[in-house]
Amino acid sequence: MTVEDLTSETAVPHLDSDSDDGGEELLVDESIESTFVPPPGKLPFSGLREQVAENSILGTVPRPLRIPEVLLEIFAASDNSTRAVSARVCRSWSNLALDVLWRDMNSPIPLLQILSPLQPKQTPADAEQPEGEIYEDWDFANGLFDVDWTRFHSYATRIRTLIYRSSDPAIGSRNNCLSPRALERVALLYPHGRCLVPNIQELTCHVTWDETVQTIPAFVGPNLKVLGMSFCKGMPGRCLKGLFQALVCRTAVLDHFHLSTDCPVTEFEEALARWLQSSPLLTEVELPRYYQTESVVRTLGQLPDLRSLAIVWDNPLPYDEHGVHFAISDDSFPNLTNLDIEGHLNYALSVLQTSPQLSRIKCICVSSYRAPTSDEVLNLTSALASACPALDVVWLNLVSEDGSTTEEPLSFEVFRPLLECHAVTEFVVGHDMPLWLEEIHVDEIAEGWPELKVLLLTRDPNFPDGDISSEQGLDISILAHMAQKLRNLTNLGLFLDVDHFTDFEGNLDPLHQFEKLIVLDLGLSSVPPHAVTAVGLYLSSLVSPETWIQCSMEPWFRGSRDAKVVENMGRWFNVHGVMNMVARSKVVTAKATGMLRQRYQADALKISPTYTHPSLSQFGPTLIPR
């Protein structure tokens, strides 16, 4: 999609009136018609443009296509090419089509190209970059002193969602960057305020260049509600400090904030706390690890509408005791329902035992810095069940990060106290070793958590040596019992033992199956080549053909995805292929069975030769089926 397509309104000013008759002028203009022909099959429904053209020549437009609500639905279901063409049909269509076309932008490049074309300027690669790579810094080809700011503003005000990247795919490869100086000049000369997109509501920034950080405020408008920012590794703290200082008092209605960086919070802690204080309507905040410092937590605690305080796992940071300070006073966090706590389990335990306000918490994630013992986990779950009886979502990251390891697998016994929280619908556990689970535990889970939908139990063990054998996993036969007891599961993740499962002699249509399962996640479970077919047949008997088989890891997974892991993922893909083959066979069998049933019914209705029953001779011959 070029800027000419996005700015298709340029033809509209030639119309002299707001009537639908103006559509005739555009539709019969051969130059326009030959330039903007919609691609085949791209229109919302076949024949739309031809119908409008025919009726417009006759001086009318179908009544349904004059209703703004109907047009908005049509444009929302169309692609950008169709919207650009629709904007040239008539004036009554133009504004609506352009509003939808420009509402969600994946790049600011089309907007900037309204002012002037962009051209690359080669810059030398840094010493740290691979030798021979060429980097291009894109800037305006012409000056900005004689441009149509009114036209620029008319499109800028339509944007509601914007993705801003340093390396923008709209201008080529990852080595092509939009020049920060270009945006600085636009922001300096823009006559309609300091925000280039005044009505923006959602902004996502991916910054890989420290000089680009200072251009982010140019896209922060007074109506911004969602702000997400991710920065490359090694981003200087001074850049983030200057950014948050510039954003103070500019996000008064901000609702959601997401920050991903590996920069220590100590380098800009004061600036971050001050900016958070100037955003009083925040309801969701996602910060990197170890950003819960005393000043940041104190500021967040005073936000009256804050409901969620979560941790971002994109950039792992070393343990920082300064960033582990979560405390709740009597007048802080009045509406908090979602909370992430990190650090030692003893620290999390003290928070749970000294904060009665946590009784309203519904979603909690607890992370342990070192490998905990079974007794420590049992104490934690007991405190959780007592302090947060209304829990709905429970995530426990018990993976060690300080180099300590444990070879003691956890038993589900340590999680039994949480069964008292009967509202739990999502339970996720991460640990260095696989979890020990038996059928009796499955029965307890089904009774304690009747509405459980997501169950992920150490599917990706983090044993440092990577020397976990499949024998330490759960026997794959436990899936049949889960299908019988856990009827509401939509996501299931387990570390399974399938090495000895080499033959399947069961029923492909058993009595109990996973009726609602969407994803079956096997994590690091290994499947030997000789077991692929048997495992595929077994899973086909328990899950529907729409269930997706995958091997993913939690964000706290510290192991490597080496060639062995990739090879194992390929085998699970083959298992999924066997499942698809069985599904197709079931369909063919069902069709054949239906045909046989219909033939049997037809044979049963065939009429035998007639004869007269002695008792019914007065009524004539009677037809008796064979």
Image: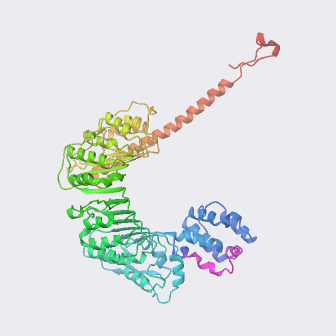
Q: Main secondary structure of the magenta part?
A: helix
Residue at 81% in and 16% down: 620
The magenta-colored residue range is: 7-26
Residue at 38% in and 64% down: 304
Give the percent coordinates (x, y) of residue 358.
Answer: 32, 54
Residue located farthest toward the left when viewing the structure as drawn: 404
Task: Please give left or right for residue 283 compared with residue 327 in the image.
Answer: right
Q: Where is the C terminus found, in terms of image quarters?
A: top right
Q: Nearer the viewer, residue 207 or 591?
A: 207
Q: Magenta segment: does it hold 13?
A: yes
Q: Nearer the viewer, residue 340 or 531?
A: 340
Q: Magenta segment: does it hold 399?
A: no
The image quadrant that residue 471 belongs to is top left
Residue at 25% in and 62% down: 290
The image quadrant that residue 274 belongs to is bottom left
Give the percent coordinates (x, y) of residue 462.
Answer: 24, 50
Residue located farthest toward the bottom when viewing the structure as drawn: 145
Give the percent coordinates (x, y) of residue 213.
Answer: 34, 75
- Res. 458 visible in picture: no
